[in-house]
Image (cartoon, rainbow, N blue to C red):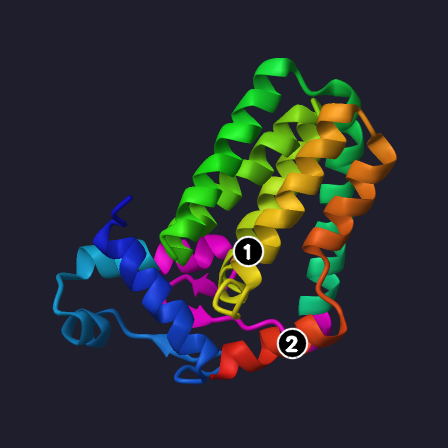
Protein backbone atom coordinates (compact mmCIF):
# COMPACT_ATOMS: atom_id res chain seq x y z
CA UNK A 1 0.00 0.00 0.00
CA UNK A 2 1.52 3.31 -1.12
CA UNK A 3 1.22 6.13 1.40
CA UNK A 4 -0.06 9.57 0.42
CA UNK A 5 2.65 12.22 0.17
CA UNK A 6 1.28 13.96 3.28
CA UNK A 7 1.48 10.68 5.24
CA UNK A 8 5.06 10.14 4.06
CA UNK A 9 5.95 13.65 5.23
CA UNK A 10 4.24 13.08 8.58
CA UNK A 11 6.25 9.88 9.12
CA UNK A 12 9.45 11.69 8.16
CA UNK A 13 8.66 14.43 10.67
CA UNK A 14 7.99 11.82 13.36
CA UNK A 15 11.42 10.32 12.73
CA UNK A 16 13.04 13.76 12.83
CA UNK A 17 11.40 14.37 16.21
CA UNK A 18 12.68 11.01 17.46
CA UNK A 19 16.16 11.89 16.23
CA UNK A 20 16.13 15.14 18.19
CA UNK A 21 15.98 17.42 15.12
CA UNK A 22 12.99 19.18 16.68
CA UNK A 23 12.68 20.01 20.35
CA UNK A 24 9.59 19.93 22.51
CA UNK A 25 7.69 23.19 21.99
CA UNK A 26 9.39 24.03 18.68
CA UNK A 27 7.19 25.58 15.99
CA UNK A 28 6.85 23.77 12.65
CA UNK A 29 7.12 26.33 9.85
CA UNK A 30 4.90 25.45 6.85
CA UNK A 31 6.95 27.47 4.34
CA UNK A 32 10.30 26.01 5.40
CA UNK A 33 8.88 22.48 5.45
CA UNK A 34 7.39 22.94 1.96
CA UNK A 35 10.84 23.94 0.70
CA UNK A 36 12.52 21.09 2.59
CA UNK A 37 10.22 18.41 1.13
CA UNK A 38 9.81 20.05 -2.28
CA UNK A 39 6.01 20.22 -2.13
CA UNK A 40 3.25 22.81 -1.88
CA UNK A 41 1.92 23.85 1.50
CA UNK A 42 -1.21 21.67 1.13
CA UNK A 43 0.45 18.29 1.89
CA UNK A 44 2.46 20.01 4.63
CA UNK A 45 -0.75 21.23 6.28
CA UNK A 46 -2.21 17.71 6.00
CA UNK A 47 0.94 16.20 7.53
CA UNK A 48 0.88 18.68 10.39
CA UNK A 49 -2.78 17.89 11.06
CA UNK A 50 -1.89 14.22 11.27
CA UNK A 51 0.75 15.07 13.90
CA UNK A 52 -1.82 17.13 15.79
CA UNK A 53 -4.37 14.30 15.65
CA UNK A 54 -1.82 11.81 16.98
CA UNK A 55 -0.92 14.18 19.81
CA UNK A 56 2.69 14.57 18.70
CA UNK A 57 2.00 18.26 18.03
CA UNK A 58 -0.45 20.89 19.20
CA UNK A 59 -2.09 23.64 17.17
CA UNK A 60 -2.35 27.04 18.82
CA UNK A 61 -4.78 29.47 17.08
CA UNK A 62 -3.03 32.36 15.32
CA UNK A 63 0.36 30.96 16.28
CA UNK A 64 0.81 27.66 14.44
CA UNK A 65 1.71 24.03 15.12
CA UNK A 66 4.20 23.11 17.84
CA UNK A 67 5.94 19.84 18.75
CA UNK A 68 4.52 18.06 21.81
CA UNK A 69 6.81 15.32 23.12
CA UNK A 70 5.76 13.24 26.13
CA UNK A 71 8.43 12.63 28.75
CA UNK A 72 9.57 9.09 29.70
CA UNK A 73 7.16 8.81 32.64
CA UNK A 74 4.15 9.95 30.59
CA UNK A 75 5.11 7.56 27.78
CA UNK A 76 5.29 4.59 30.16
CA UNK A 77 1.92 5.59 31.63
CA UNK A 78 0.35 5.74 28.18
CA UNK A 79 1.66 2.28 27.29
CA UNK A 80 0.44 0.90 30.62
CA UNK A 81 -3.02 2.35 29.98
CA UNK A 82 -3.04 1.00 26.41
CA UNK A 83 -2.07 -2.44 27.71
CA UNK A 84 -4.99 -2.42 30.16
CA UNK A 85 -7.45 -1.24 27.50
CA UNK A 86 -6.31 -3.95 25.10
CA UNK A 87 -6.39 -6.56 27.86
CA UNK A 88 -10.01 -5.61 28.62
CA UNK A 89 -10.89 -5.77 24.92
CA UNK A 90 -9.28 -9.21 24.68
CA UNK A 91 -11.13 -10.53 27.73
CA UNK A 92 -14.49 -9.41 26.34
CA UNK A 93 -13.73 -10.42 22.75
CA UNK A 94 -12.92 -13.97 23.88
CA UNK A 95 -16.58 -14.48 24.75
CA UNK A 96 -18.25 -11.95 22.44
CA UNK A 97 -16.39 -11.91 19.13
CA UNK A 98 -18.41 -13.29 16.22
CA UNK A 99 -17.16 -15.96 13.84
CA UNK A 100 -16.99 -13.31 11.11
CA UNK A 101 -14.90 -11.09 13.38
CA UNK A 102 -12.55 -13.95 14.14
CA UNK A 103 -12.17 -14.62 10.41
CA UNK A 104 -11.29 -10.97 9.79
CA UNK A 105 -8.76 -11.14 12.62
CA UNK A 106 -7.10 -14.18 11.07
CA UNK A 107 -7.04 -12.46 7.68
CA UNK A 108 -5.35 -9.39 9.21
CA UNK A 109 -2.83 -11.72 10.86
CA UNK A 110 -2.08 -13.34 7.50
CA UNK A 111 -1.43 -9.91 5.98
CA UNK A 112 0.93 -9.20 8.90
CA UNK A 113 2.70 -12.47 8.12
CA UNK A 114 3.05 -11.48 4.45
CA UNK A 115 4.58 -8.16 5.51
CA UNK A 116 7.12 -9.94 7.74
CA UNK A 117 8.11 -12.22 4.86
CA UNK A 118 8.60 -9.14 2.69
CA UNK A 119 10.47 -7.36 5.50
CA UNK A 120 8.07 -4.44 5.06
CA UNK A 121 7.76 -2.73 8.45
CA UNK A 122 5.40 -0.01 7.13
CA UNK A 123 2.95 -2.58 5.74
CA UNK A 124 3.24 -4.63 8.92
CA UNK A 125 2.30 -1.65 11.05
CA UNK A 126 -0.82 -0.90 8.98
CA UNK A 127 -2.01 -4.51 9.16
CA UNK A 128 -1.10 -4.69 12.84
CA UNK A 129 -3.40 -1.72 13.44
CA UNK A 130 -6.20 -3.54 11.64
CA UNK A 131 -5.52 -6.68 13.72
CA UNK A 132 -5.90 -4.81 17.00
CA UNK A 133 -8.93 -2.87 15.80
CA UNK A 134 -10.74 -6.15 15.11
CA UNK A 135 -10.21 -7.05 18.77
CA UNK A 136 -11.59 -3.68 19.90
CA UNK A 137 -14.63 -4.26 17.68
CA UNK A 138 -14.99 -7.84 18.89
CA UNK A 139 -15.32 -6.66 22.50
CA UNK A 140 -18.73 -5.19 21.49
CA UNK A 141 -18.36 -2.28 23.90
CA UNK A 142 -18.50 0.95 21.90
CA UNK A 143 -17.15 3.17 24.70
CA UNK A 144 -14.16 0.87 25.29
CA UNK A 145 -13.60 0.67 21.54
CA UNK A 146 -13.52 4.48 21.19
CA UNK A 147 -11.07 4.88 24.08
CA UNK A 148 -8.80 2.14 22.70
CA UNK A 149 -8.83 3.71 19.22
CA UNK A 150 -8.06 7.13 20.69
CA UNK A 151 -4.99 5.93 22.59
CA UNK A 152 -3.91 3.65 19.74
CA UNK A 153 -3.78 6.75 17.54
CA UNK A 154 -1.86 8.70 20.20
CA UNK A 155 0.77 5.96 20.52
CA UNK A 156 1.02 5.29 16.79
CA UNK A 157 4.48 6.87 16.27
CA UNK A 158 5.95 5.10 19.29
CA UNK A 159 4.51 1.67 18.46
CA UNK A 160 5.76 2.06 14.90
CA UNK A 161 9.33 2.83 15.95
CA UNK A 162 9.48 -0.43 17.94
CA UNK A 163 9.21 -2.38 14.69
CA UNK A 164 12.68 -1.12 13.73
CA UNK A 165 14.25 -3.34 16.40
CA UNK A 166 15.79 -6.53 15.04
CA UNK A 167 13.40 -9.48 15.37
CA UNK A 168 10.50 -7.42 16.78
CA UNK A 169 8.15 -8.04 13.82
CA UNK A 170 8.64 -11.80 14.09
CA UNK A 171 8.11 -11.68 17.86
CA UNK A 172 4.97 -9.59 17.44
CA UNK A 173 3.65 -12.07 14.87
CA UNK A 174 4.19 -14.99 17.27
CA UNK A 175 2.30 -13.06 19.97
CA UNK A 176 -0.56 -12.51 17.51
CA UNK A 177 -0.81 -16.27 17.01
CA UNK A 178 -1.11 -16.79 20.76
CA UNK A 179 -3.80 -14.11 20.95
CA UNK A 180 -5.77 -15.74 18.11
CA UNK A 181 -5.53 -19.13 19.83
CA UNK A 182 -6.89 -17.67 23.09
CA UNK A 183 -9.77 -15.89 21.34
CA UNK A 184 -10.63 -18.96 19.25
CA UNK A 185 -10.71 -21.10 22.40
CA UNK A 186 -12.82 -18.51 24.23
CA UNK A 187 -10.15 -18.31 26.94
CA UNK A 188 -10.81 -14.84 28.35
CA UNK A 189 -8.12 -15.01 31.03
CA UNK A 190 -5.37 -16.02 28.61
CA UNK A 191 -6.48 -13.47 25.98
CA UNK A 192 -6.37 -10.73 28.60
CA UNK A 193 -2.92 -11.76 29.87
CA UNK A 194 -1.41 -12.15 26.39
CA UNK A 195 -2.67 -8.81 25.08
CA UNK A 196 -1.45 -7.00 28.19
CA UNK A 197 2.04 -8.42 27.73
CA UNK A 198 1.94 -7.80 23.97
CA UNK A 199 1.36 -4.06 24.37
CA UNK A 200 3.14 -3.19 27.60
CA UNK A 201 6.57 -1.59 27.41
CA UNK A 202 8.76 -2.47 30.38
CA UNK A 203 12.41 -2.68 31.32
CA UNK A 204 14.66 -3.49 28.39
CA UNK A 205 12.00 -2.85 25.74
CA UNK A 206 11.42 0.66 27.04
CA UNK A 207 15.14 1.36 27.02
CA UNK A 208 15.23 0.15 23.40
CA UNK A 209 12.28 2.40 22.57
CA UNK A 210 13.95 5.47 24.05
CA UNK A 211 17.24 4.63 22.31
CA UNK A 212 15.40 4.09 19.01
CA UNK A 213 13.80 7.51 19.30
CA UNK A 214 17.25 9.09 19.58
CA UNK A 215 19.15 7.00 17.02
Which labelled disc corresponds to residue 170?
Answer: 1
Q: Position of residue 84 (x, y in %)?
A: 78, 48
Numbered-mark total: 2
Residue in the foreground of this view, choosing between 207 and 149 = 207
Mark 2 lies on residue: 71
Residue 64 seen by the camera: no
CB contact under 8 Å: marks 1 and 2: no
Spatial CA span between label 1 and label 2: 28 Å
Q: In this rendering, would 36 be left or right of 165?
A: left
Provide the residue span drawn in magenta. 48-74
- The residue at 55%/37% (across/down) is 131
Q: In this rendering, would 138 be left or right of 59?
A: right
- The residue at 69%/60% (across/down) is 78
Residue in the foreground of this view, choosing between 9 and 215 = 215
Looking at the image, residue 54 lies above or below residue 92: below
Q: In this rendering, would 73 be left or right of 37?
A: right
Amino acid sequence: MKLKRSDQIAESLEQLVFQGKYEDGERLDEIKLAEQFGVSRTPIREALQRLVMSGMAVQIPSRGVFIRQPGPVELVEMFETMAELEASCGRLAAVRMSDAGLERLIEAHQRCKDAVEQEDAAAYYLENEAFHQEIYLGATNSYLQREALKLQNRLKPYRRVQLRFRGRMGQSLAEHEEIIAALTAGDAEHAEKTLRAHVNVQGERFQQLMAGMKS
